[in-house]
Image (tube, rainbow, N blue to C red):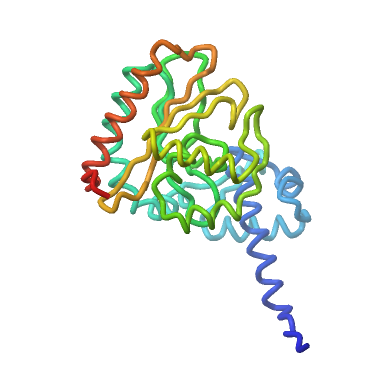
Amino acid sequence: MVRMATNPQKSENVASVLKVFSVLETLSEDREASLAAIAQRAMTSKSTTHRLLQTMVDLGYVHQDEETEKYGLTMKLFSVAARAVKQESDLLHIADAGMGKLARSTGETINLGIMDDHDQRVVYVHSYPSAFNLSMKSTIGMRNPLHSTSLGKALLSFRDESEVEERISQMTFDKRAPNTITTPEALREQIALTRSNGFSEEIEESEAGVRCMAVPLRNHLGKSVGAISIAFPIFRFDEGRRGEYIHLLTSVAGDISSQLGFTGDS
């Protein structure tokens, strides 16, 4: 058997890129952090971390506080991310009014999520905060596994079967909460149920004490390009209003999908 020779330079380049993103992701979790903290959390040496940080400072993506000597991200990285999601701007603009209606009608946290093209996760791109002090906190840019969220089920419900199966084959089905789905078969059942009902639910599948309901947003091809959810603390979910919640969600989703070109024929 002929073995392909490995390319040391290529391996070194890949390792360097991984370290850069490890530092960036570490910084994204805190407003500011010290060199030692960044190196520890990014699992790189202090010398390597310092070299990477200085390069990022020179490029304008990271700043260092002169007094504390701590590092933080600049808005330049945000501008890059903003350009990356520009293609989703129409969806955000169209969905905003409906999300506002849901927020006013329920008082709960409303989230808009889209599918990560490179990972089996849903990305939170827009939200309305709850009117209550005790509520579900969502962060724009947050990413949760598709298999453990109502948003994920809604997003998967109107995608090509081949894509769904490919994504399922790459999932690890980590248990995140008391009722997390942990098998491909259970997820397939939930996707089919969502497709049939027009909405998805999850009770303590992503986080203990949290219940969510979600609906897919479909484009002119009938493909789910986004999903909207209502997130409730379990103790505040009113079972007597469940039908009302479903009607609100499906009505808003229908309006948004119509504006995205969906005619109901796909």
Q: Residue at x 54, y 17 (%)?
A: 234
Q: Position of residue 109 (x, y in %)?
A: 43, 24
Residue 107 % position (x, y): 39, 17
- Number of numbered discs on residues: 0
Relative to 208, 213 lies left or right = left
Q: Outermost residue toward the bottom?
A: 2
Residue at 69% in and 60% down? 51
Image x and y of residue 229, in percent: 42, 31
Is 258 displayed left or right of 5 in the figure? Answer: left
- Residue, x 67% and y 76% (percent of image)? 10
**Quarter holding residue 176:** top right
Q: Is residue 13 above or below residue 46?
A: below
Q: Residue at x 55, y 50 (%)?
A: 120
Along the line of sight, the residue nearer the viewer: 82 or 233: 233
User: Taking 159 as reference, is 256 left or right?
Assistant: left
Front residue of 68/132: it is: 132
92 or 247: which is nearer to us? 247
